[in-house]
Image (cartoon, rainbow, N blue to C red):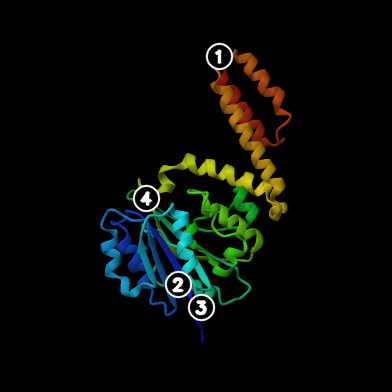
């Protein structure tokens, strides 16, 4: 007979009144007997609080108060959690029926540290089912071939989150990427399931859709942070490569835009610095592409 480990879910929320009821219902209608559900609303000014109040007798805890962003809201909820299994579910996403039973069953093997299932990314115009795959710390950090990562479909053991440093609140966009790299580094045993767990909504207001450049900036900052951290020595070679590649990309972009210098001088300068870069096919392709744009 299957036991039912406690599952803790935190929903961070801010002004998602048009979506949050579907999110709440998708969790409460799981019919999972050992559920801890917490909603941390950041002081929404729309009708979010009214919707949450409709379900407050079925919630473990909820509050609507100003916070310092999504990572802070999740951390506040995480502090209240007592479950064995954890994830956060944003207030514009929702669970597939029966998802929690499948996640719990996968975690019955005590050796499993991560359960990764499929996520349906959808918008008004398109839909795509993505199976999280090949999740390792290095693979995720370097986006190695075949790596697929959509956060709502990747569930963790709550006790291990703090052991790898928890959610870093200095980041507002790529904090999940940072957490999962660190978690996977220390706790790499992943069970992948080709089973749909979560529906991930893409719309104009979602950070994933609208703020790609800010994600990229934070990803660079995270790589630099990991490179300085002695707890991640096995990633330092890859970090150094990523930092070098990022600087070379910026150097190429700046050289292309520098119309104050003659084309020949710019190209010569690129070639003089090329030997300092990682000697691989992608470096040469990037450099040749920059030269073509200069010409």
- Asked whether the beta carbons under mark 2 and mark 1 sit within 8 Å of each other, the answer is no
- Give the residue number, with chain letter if any, for mark 3: 5
Classed neighbour count for the residue bearing mark 1: other residues with Cα under 10 Å, few (<14), some (14–19), many (≥20): few
Answer with mark 3 or mark 1, whichever residue precedes in sequence: 3
- Real-space Cα separation, disc 4 to disc 1, in angstroms: 44 Å
| Along the line of sight, the residue nearer the viewer: 270 or 260 | 260
Q: Please provide percent x and percent y for residue 287.
A: 63, 28
**The C terminus lies in quadrant:** top right
- Asked whether the beta carbons under mark 2 and mark 3 sit within 8 Å of each other, the answer is no
Answer with mark 2 or mark 4, whichever residue precedes in sequence: 2
Q: Nearer the viewer, mark 4 or mark 1?
A: 1
Answer with mark 3 or mark 4, whichever residue precedes in sequence: 3
- Real-space Cα separation, disc 2 to disc 4, in angstroms: 26 Å
- Secondary structure under tag 3 reads loop
- Secondary structure under tag 4 reads loop
- Asked whether the beta carbons under mark 3 and mark 1 sit within 8 Å of each other, the answer is no
What's the residue at 47%, 73% (across, down)?
Answer: 7
Answer with mark 2 or mark 3, whichever residue precedes in sequence: 3
- Real-space Cα separation, disc 3 to disc 4, in angstroms: 35 Å
- Asked whether the beta carbons under mark 2 and mark 4 sit within 8 Å of each other, the answer is no
- Residue 100 image label: 2
Q: Nearer the viewer, mark 2 or mark 1?
A: 1
- Give the residue number, with chain letter if any, for mark 1: 260
Answer with mark 4 or mark 1, whichever residue precedes in sequence: 4
One can see residue 99 in this view: yes
- Give the residue number, with chain letter if any, for mark 4: 126
What's the residue at 57%, 57% (across, down)?
Answer: 180
Q: Nearer the viewer, mark 3 or mark 4?
A: 3
């Amino acid at each position: 007979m299957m036991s039912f480990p406690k599952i803790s879910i935190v929903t961070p929320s801010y002004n998602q009144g048009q979506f949050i009821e579907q999110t709440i219902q998708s969790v409460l209608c799981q019919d999972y007997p050992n559920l801890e559900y917490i909603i941390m609303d950041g002081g929404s000014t729309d009708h979010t609080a009214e919707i949450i109040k409709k379900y407050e007798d079925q919630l473990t805890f909820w509050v609507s108060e100003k916070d310092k962003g999504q990572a802070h809201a999740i951390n506040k909820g995480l502090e209240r959690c007592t479950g064995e299994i954890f994830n956060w579910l944003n207030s514009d996403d929702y669970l597939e029926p029966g998802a929690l039973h499948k996640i719990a069953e996968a975690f019955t093997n005590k050796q499993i540290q991560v359960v990764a299932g499929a996520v349906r990314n959808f918008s008004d115009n398109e839909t795509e089912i993505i199976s999280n795959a090949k999740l390792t710390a290095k693979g995720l950090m370097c986006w190695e071939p075949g790596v697929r990562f959509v956060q709502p479909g990747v569930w963790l053991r709550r006790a291990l989150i703090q052991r790898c440093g928890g959610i870093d609140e200095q980041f507002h966009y790529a904090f999940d990427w940072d957490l999962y790299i660190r978690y996977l580094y220390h706790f790499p045993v992943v069970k992948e399931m080709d089973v749909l767990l979560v529906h991930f909504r893409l719309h104009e207001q979602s950070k994933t859709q609208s703020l790609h450049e800010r994600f990229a900036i934070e990803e660079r900052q995270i790589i630099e942070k990991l490179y300085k951290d002695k707890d991640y020595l096995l990633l330092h070679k890859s970090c150094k490569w990523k930092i070098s590649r990022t600087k070379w990309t910026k150097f190429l972009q700046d050289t292309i835009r520098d119309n104050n210098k003659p084309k020949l001088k710019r190209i010569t300068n690129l070639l003089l610095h090329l030997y300092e870069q990682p000697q691989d096919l992608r470096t040469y392709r990037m450099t040749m592409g920059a030269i073509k744009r200069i010409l």
